[in-house]
Each structure stands twice: as C-alpha cells, then as structure tokens.
Amino acid sequence: DVKVTQSSRYLVKRTGEKVFLECVQDMDHENMFWYRQDPGLGLRLIYFSYDVKMKEKGDIPEGYSVSREKKERFSLILESASTNQTSMYLCASRNRVNTGELFFGEGSRLTVL
Amino acid sequence: GQSLEQPSEVTAVEGAIVQINCTYQTSGFYGLSWYQQHDGGAPTFLSYNALDGLEETGRFSSFLSRSDSYGYLLLQELQMKDSASYFCAALQQAGTALIFGKGTTLSVSS
C-alpha cells in the first residue's frame, strides 16, 4: 500500500514562529502536493512539486515556501506563522502525471495563536 | 477563473440512490476525479474519468460529459458508512495539480 506520512498530526504555534510541516511518501512518486483545507472552502493548492528540486506555486502560495531535496520528502514552511494560517494541511503524492489519483496523508492540523 | 460547483449538502436514507453533480469551468480540462473524506480522515480516491461516459466500481459510479462540462458521482444501495464529504476535482492538463470543488456533505440516515 502507498503510504504518505505527515510528521505531525496536531501542532500549536505562536504568531511569528517558523513552522515546518514534513511529508514523506514511500512509493517513489515523482509528484507531490500541499493543500490546505478549510470548512466551506474545500482543498486549495498551496504548492506542488513535479520532481526533486522542482516546485510550482498553487493558488494560495503567499506566506508559504516549500523544499524538495529528496524524492520522497516534501516540506512546507511557514516563515512567520499568522493566525490566518490556522488550518488543516494535507500532503499528497501521485505516481503518474496523467491521472487524477492522489494519495493523501492524514493531515496536519495547525493552530496559530 | 476556474471553478467547480457541487451542492453543499445532500441527505438520503439507507438503501437509496444518490447523485452528486459537479459542473466545472477551467482553462483546460484533462479529466475529473472524485474523492471521499470521512470526518477527521484523509481524502481517499474513488474514481477518475478522462473520457465521456459512465465508469462503474461496485456501488459507486462516475459519469463525465465533456461537452456539458459536467460530471456526477452516483452512489447506490446507500449505507450509513457512506456518510462523508465528497469532492470532485479537475485535472486541467497532464502533469498539473488537481483543482478541487468545495465538497458535498452526504448524510445517510436509517
């Protein structure tokens, strides 16, 4: 089974802190994604990476950056957390570029105080 | 702009059939996916339609009409465990990310 693992299930941070959300997949997938999910807004794309060291901005990249140094790991970084970044963050991976099948992690619920 | 529209809520009883519609407006279109998400859980993949027509997988079926920019998810013989949120998501072109709708909350009662 494909496994996408997000390092933290729940985090509480203070405004201005730097936050790292880690995601690891074990199936050698080339594409990886970060979405945030908020009630009534669905899933919104923050960044995605189609290969190591490659990244593309999604619909809401402001306030976020990403790192993909190894194929299996895709990190989301909040340089200076703000309260409006309180959300559920979902990492996903995909094995083929021409398919709509994503494999999601369990999510990281971030609260910024 | 690009958007996917789906109803916010649907209710049904056990054993019934329910159809969740999704209309999309995107700058390009490659295919339409459906995902299920239970409360507190991760979204899980249900189906992907790249061609027009109906795809059946057990109790769930998914339909796509490219000419109408429309698709639906059909759930048959509803069970309580089908109570969840369902998302349609469009793939604009190969290699890009999925754009998700806002989700439909399905409540199944006995």
Image: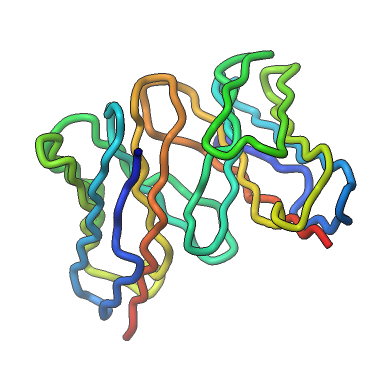
Say if residue B89 shows up in the picture.
Answer: yes
Q: Is residue B77 above or below residue B51?
A: below
Colour scheme shown? rainbow
Q: Position of residue A7 (x, y in %)?
A: 77, 43
The percent position of residue A5, horizontal first and vertical second, equals 69, 40
Q: Position of residue A35 (x, y in %)?
A: 58, 42
x 57%, y 37%: residue = A92
Q: Residue B104 lies in what quarter of the image?
A: bottom left
Quadrant where the N terminus of chain B lies? top left
Q: Quarter of the image holding residue A49?
A: top right
Image side of residue B93 versus residue B97, left or right: left
For this rendering, which residue is in front, A49 or A1? A49
Q: Which of the two residues, B82 or A52, is positioned nearer the viewer here?
A: A52
Q: Looking at the image, is B13 positioned above or below residue B5?
A: below
Q: Is residue B22 left or right of residue A4?
A: left
The answer to which of B41 and A39 lies nearer the viewer is A39
Which residue shows up at 72% across the image and 35% down it? A76
Q: Where is the C terminus of chain B found, in terms of image quarters?
A: bottom left
Image side of residue A103 versus residue B104, left or right = right
Where residue B108 appears, as percent x and y from the top left, is 34, 77
Q: Residue at x 63, y 38 (%)?
A: A4
Q: Please, which residue is most extreme toward the bottom here?
A: B110
Residue A109 seen by the camera: no
Q: Is residue B30 left or right of residue A93?
A: left
Q: Looking at the image, how many numbered discs can be counted on the residues?
A: 0
